[in-house]
Structure formats: structure tokens, C-alpha cells
Image: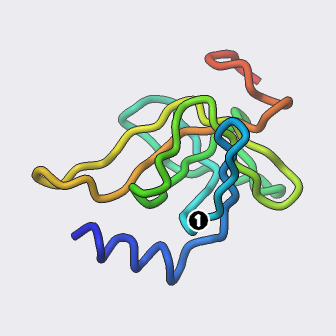
Amino acid sequence: MRAAAEQVMERFGTELTIHHGSETKTLRGFFRAVNSQSWQSLESVVSPLGETSRGQYAYIGPVSGAVQEGDTLTLGEKTYLFRRTELYFFRQEAIYQWGLCVEKGVNDTWGCQS
């Protein structure tokens, strides 16, 4: 199952640069703006600029990416801060890693309305 998920990320994902301390790695995954009004609703609300009013972003990447809270992700000219990361399991196998990010320096105060 994990191999299939990683094949999808490799084929259709975006190249993302992850920074963990002084270490930098490049991987392929998915990254998009989300509206997280509650944990029950992660419905996208896209503005003309492609961002949400609260400025939160969802990340899905390979387990081998080993992203941690506090790491940063660079995509284009912008840098995003990981506020939460977790592995997604199917039965006893970690399938992928997901994370919730905010744009660094713009909306990186956790829990505040923008």
C-alpha cells in the first residue's frame, strides 16, 4: 500500500524542498491551501490568489520524508512552517505523512485569526 502511495506522489506530486535544521532535502508530494474551520471540515476555499483567508496549507508526502513540526518547506519564492505533522496508517503500515503549514513570516502565529 505504501509503495502505491509513493508511486502516486512521485508521478503526480510537486517537487518540494524541506529544511530540517541545517539539512535540506527535496522530495515529491502534494501541497495546497485549505480552510480548516474545524477538524470535521477540510474543504478548500480558494481565493483569486489561490490562498485561503486563514492561510493554512495541507502537506502530503512520503514517510521517508520524515518531516517534523518546526521544519520549513520552500515552494517557489515562499517558505512555509510545519505546525503539525503525523503519519497516516493503514492497518499497521505507515502509508504517508501529512502536515499542516502556515506561511512563514506572514501567518505563522498559531491559533490567531488573520
Q: Determine the image quadrant of residue 48.
A: bottom right
Q: Position of residue 114 (x, y in %)?
A: 77, 24
Image position of 102 with respect to 46: above or below: above
Q: Quadrant of the N terminus?
A: bottom left
* Disc 1 target residue: 27
Task: Report the front residue among 64 and 108.
Answer: 64
Task: Name the residue rendered at 52%, 44% in the picture.
Answer: 67
Mark 1 lies on a secondary structure that is: strand
Q: Position of residue 46 (x, y in %)?
A: 69, 54
When the figure is inspected, residue 101 is found, relative to residue 61, above or below; the finding is: above
Residue 79 pos. (x, y %) = 79, 45
**Residue sticking out furthest to the right:** 77
Q: Nearer the viewer, residue 55 or 96?
A: 96
Q: Residues within 10 Å of mark 1 (few under 14, many from 20)?
A: some
| Amino acid beneath label 1 | Leu
Asked if residue 15 lies left or right of residue 13, the reply is right
101 vs 67, left or right, is right
Query: Which color mode does the image show?
Result: rainbow
| Residue farthest left in this picture | 91
The structure residue drawn at horizontal position 65% and vertical position 19%, both measured from the top left corner, is 110
For residue 27, which quarter of the picture? bottom right
- Camera-side residue: 58 or 94? 94
Residue 14, position as x, y percentages in the image: 63, 71
Q: Name the residue located 53 percent from the left edge and 80 percent from the top edge.
A: 12
Residue at point 64%, 50% (across, down): 33
